[in-house]
Image (cartoon, rainbow, N blue to C red):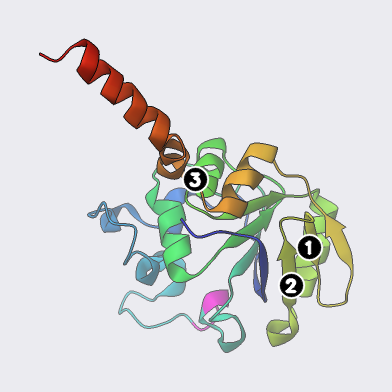
Amino acid sequence: MEKFDKLTSVAAPLPLINVDTDMIIPARFLKTIKRTGLGSDLFSTLRFNEDGSDREDFVLNKPAYKDAEILVAGDNFGCGSSREHAPWALMDYGIKCVIAPSFADIFFNNSSKNGMLLIKLPQEQVDKLMQDADQGANSTFTVDLEAQEITGPDGEVIKFEVDAFKKHCLLNGLDDIGLTMQKDQKINDYEERQKAAQPW
């Protein structure tokens, strides 16, 4: 898992509430257990017309936001089914941070375990950041996880809270496997003792 420390990027505004995981990545694309390749179908029903052409009015299809790595979203982002493909699709597209007033619990935990930072802020602060993100190519934010700060395009700094364990894992690029491998020597020592005690 890649480390997350500081991110500077254009932020894309998505002022929709209750964006569920089927909207993030529709069920018809859940035919893989790989974490790659899902970004092309991210927000498929919002991004594309029935003939596969881009919907020009969707934010990620606008030239200013094509390379956005930060998403400012509405309340209850990631609700619906618990599919882990939702954070996979966001990250495969290039989204590394989502800011919203609230997130569905399972999506929230899945995201941090896959290296994506989700930031919960009061509605009024999200509204301010949504306005900032609406400036197109000028909507550059810096998210500093170590300092727990978001700096907007006007220089205003907003502090955010983050769980200490999730922060540690993100800063050090540790998913569940990485956390286990930190105990590699103890695991090996235990297995050697077991072999010696029970050689059969």
Q: Amino acid at mark 3?
A: Lys
Q: Which residues are magenta?
A: 56-60
Disc 3 residue crowd, few under 14, some 14–19, many 20+, Cα 10 Å: many
Disc 1 residue crowd, few under 14, some 14–19, many 20+, Cα 10 Å: many
Q: Residue furthest left?
A: 200
45 on left or right of 14: left
Task: Report if residue 29 is visible in the image.
Answer: yes
N-term-proximal mark, 1 vs 3? 3
Do residues under tags 2 and 1 come within 8 Å of each other at their CB atoms?
yes
Q: Nearer the viewer, residue 100 or 195?
A: 195
Asked if residue 186 lies in the magenta stretch, the reply is: no
41 on left or right of 64: left
Q: Which residue is mark 1?
A: 150
Give me the residue at 35% from left, 27% from top: 189
Q: Position of residue 86 (x, y in %)?
A: 43, 53
- Quadrant in which residue 89 is drawn: bottom left
Q: Which residue is mark 2?
A: 141
Above-or-below relation of 119 to 133: above
Q: Which residue is mark 3?
A: 113
Q: Amino acid at mark 2?
A: Phe
Q: Secondary structure at mark 3?
A: helix
Do residues under tags 3 and 2 come within 8 Å of each other at their CB atoms?
no
Prevailing secondary structure class for the magenta stretch in the rendered image: loop
Residue at mark 2 to residue at mark 1: CA–CA distance? 7 Å
Mark carried by residue 172 = none
Task: Report if residue 43 is visible in the image.
Answer: no
154 on left or right of 78: right
